C-alpha cells in the first residue's frame, strides 16, 4: 500500500518561480491537509480539504493555492516563490474513523 | 482559538529511565482529540498515541502513555524504559472535532543517553 505519496522529495527554486507540490493518497481519506515545518515553529497548517471540491485556509495560507478535484489528490501550488517559503512541506490525511494523521514523507523546498 | 503549548524545547533522559514530555492545550470545544507524534532524524512523522476528550481512562500504547488531566488542560506523554531509538522530536497535537483541523505544538527534542 502506498499510503500518502508526496513528490518531489527535494526542490530548489529561484525567487519568483512557481511550482506545484503533489500529494496523492490511496486510502480514501476524505480529509487532506498541507503543513509547513520550520525550526522552532512546529507544523503550521497552510490549507486543508474535508472532501473533493471543498478547501479552506489554515494558519499560513498566503502565497499558496490548493484545489481538490478528486478524493485522491491535493496539490499545493506556490504562485511566486519567496525565500520565506523555504521549508519542509508535509501532506497529511485522515478520515473520521482514524485517530491520527497519515503523513507523506515530506518535500524539502529551498528558495534562493 | 485553539492552542497547543510545549514548553520544553529539549530534554535529556538516561537509557532505561522514564521521561515525561509536557503538553498543555486550550480549546472551548467540549469534543476534541489529543495526539502525540514522533519525528526521528530521518524526518518522517510517526503517530504514537491518541486521547479523546471524553475518554475516562488514560491512553496507553506499549511504552507510551498519555497523562490526561482535563481540568488542567494537560496531555503529557510518558515514555517508560527509554531506549536510544527514542531520541527524536516529539510533537503534541489537537484535532478540532468539527473541521478535523489539527494544530501542533512547537515540539520537544528528546535525547536518550547511554
Image (cartoon, rainbow, N blue to C red):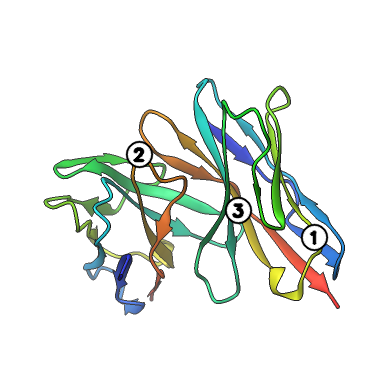
Q: Dividing the picture into quarters, in which one does residue A22 lie?
A: bottom left
Label 1 is found on which chain of the structure? B
Q: Is residue B30 above or below residue B68?
A: above
- Residue occupied by mark 2: A96
Compute the Cα span from label 2 to label 3: 21 Å
Q: Do discs 3 and 1 share a chain?
A: yes
**Disc number for residue B11:** 1
Q: Residue at x 23, y 71 (%)?
A: A17
Compute the Cα span from label 1 to label 2: 34 Å
Q: Is residue A9 above or below residue A31?
A: below
Locate residue B19, reporting x and y percent. Answer: 81, 56
Judged from the image, the secondary structure of the residue bearing numbered disc 2 is loop
Q: Nearer the viewer, residue A92 or B8?
A: A92
Judged from the image, the secondary structure of the residue bearing numbered disc 1 is strand
Q: Do discs 1 and 2 share a chain?
A: no
Crowd around label 2: few <14 · some 14–19 · many ≥20 (10 Å): few
Crowd around label 1: few <14 · some 14–19 · many ≥20 (10 Å): some
Horizontal relation, residue A27 to residue B32: left or right: left
- Residue occupied by mark 3: B91
Q: Residue at x 41, y 70 (%)?
A: A105
Judged from the image, the secondary structure of the residue bearing numbered disc 3 is strand
Horizontal relation, residue A77 to residue B109: left or right: left
Locate residue A60, reporting x and y percent. Answer: 39, 46
Locate residue A66, reporting x and y percent. Answer: 22, 52
1 vs 2, front mark = 2
| Label tally | 3
Among the two numbered marks 3 and 1 on one chain, the one whose residue lies closer to the N terminus: 1
| Quadrant holding the C terminus of chain A | bottom left
Label 3 is found on which chain of the structure? B
Q: Do discs 2 and 3 share a chain?
A: no
Horizontal relation, residue A22 to residue B82: left or right: left
Amino acid at each position: 500500500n502506498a499510503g500518502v505519496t508526496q513528490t518531489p522529495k527535494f526542490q530548489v527554486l529561484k525567487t519568483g518561480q512557481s511550482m506545484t507540490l503533489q500529494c496523492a493518497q490511496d486510502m480514501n481519506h476524505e480529509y487532506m491537509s498541507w503543513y509547513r515545518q520550520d525550526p522552532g515553529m512546529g507544523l503550521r497548517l497552510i490549507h486543508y480539504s474535508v472532501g473533493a471540491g471543498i478547501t479552506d485556509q489554515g494558519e499560513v495560507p498566503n502565497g499558496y493555492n490548493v484545489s481538490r478535484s478528486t478524493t485522491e489528490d491535493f496539490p499545493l501550488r506556490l504562485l511566486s516563490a519567496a525565500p520565506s517559503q523555504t521549508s519542509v512541506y508535509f501532506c497529511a490525511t485522515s478520515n473520521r474513523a482514524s485517530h491520527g494523521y497519515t503523513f507523506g514523507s515530506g518535500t524539502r523546498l529551498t528558495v534562493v | 482559538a485553539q492552542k497547543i503549548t510545549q514548553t520544553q524545547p529539549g530534554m535529556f533522559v538516561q537509557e532505561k529511565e522514564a521521561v515525561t514530555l509536557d503538553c498543555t492545550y486550550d480549546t472551548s470545544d467540549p469534543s476534541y482529540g489529543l495526539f502525540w507524534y514522533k519525528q526521528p532524524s530521518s524526518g518522517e512523522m510517526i503517530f504514537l498515541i491518541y486521547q479523546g476528550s471524553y475518554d475516562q481512562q488514560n491512553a496507553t500504547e506499549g511504552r507510551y502513555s498519555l497523562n490526561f488531566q482535563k481540568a488542567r488542560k494537560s496531555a503529557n506523554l510518558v515514555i517508560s524504559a527509554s531506549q536510544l531509538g527514542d531520541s527524536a522530536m516529539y510533537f503534541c497535537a489537537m484535532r478540532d472535532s468539527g473541521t478535523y483541523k489539527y494544530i501542533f505544538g512547537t515540539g520537544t527534542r528528546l535525547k536518550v543517553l547511554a
